[in-house]
Amino acid sequence: MSIFRFLKRSDIECPRCLGKGFVDLEDIIRLKRQLKWVPAPCAYCNATGRVAKEMLEKVAVDCMYLTIDLPESIIEKIKDGDQETIEKGKLRERFIDNLIQYAEEHYFDKNMDAESIANLYLSTEEENAAFSVTKEELIQYVQDVIELKYAEIATKKNP
């Protein structure tokens, strides 16, 4: 058996993008990464559609932080299992989860609109936030949170 055939056999279809090389909306929903990812080339397989079997042991398929917009050096650290880089990714995911919860609570419990929520967040949380965002980005993100929550509510009412 040639070395090329052996190497080819050790690769599998990428479980994140299902071999397409691109993470689309269906993949995002399947991996429960709405509001955390956007459709883009797949960082898990580097847009090739195939990954080494060992990758599955090192990096979770739904690892939120592993996205194509990161510098190549960071992507490689994640894929190599660098604990400091992985912890930074977990911190970012907690930040996003908290931001989603903040937006939902202020919209549904306090009847605030997206711009008011963004203004309040920026005036009270900005100094403590681990990651910075512009007001416009935050308003759009809060609107996206609200739309997704309404879609979830509608789905539960009409399965």
Image (spheres, grey):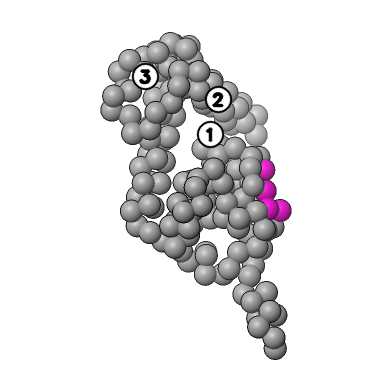
- Determine if residue 146 is in view: no
Give the residue number, with chain letter if any, for mark 3.
121
Give the residue number, with chain letter if any, for mark 1.
35
Residue type at numbered disc 2: Asp
Task: Say if the magenta span includes residue 91.
Answer: no
Give x and y (percent) for residue 7. Answer: 64, 77
- Determine if residue 135 is in view: yes
Element on which disc 2 rests: helix
Residue 144 tag number:
2
Q: How many marks?
A: 3
Residue at the location (65% across, 53% down)?
A: 47
Q: Main secondary structure of the magenta part?
A: loop
Q: Which residues are magenta?
A: 20-24
Tell me the quarter of the image containing the N terminus: bottom right
Residue at the location (46% across, 46% down)?
A: 65
Residue type at numbered disc 1: Leu
User: On the picture, is 93 further left or further right than 52?
Assistant: left
Q: Residue furthest bottom?
A: 1
Along the line of sight, the residue nearer the viewer: 154 or 34: 34
| Circle 1/circle 2 CB separation < 8 Å | yes
Residue at the location (39% across, 28% down)?
A: 132
Give x and y (percent) for residue 8. Answer: 67, 74
| Circle 2/circle 3 CB separation < 8 Å | no
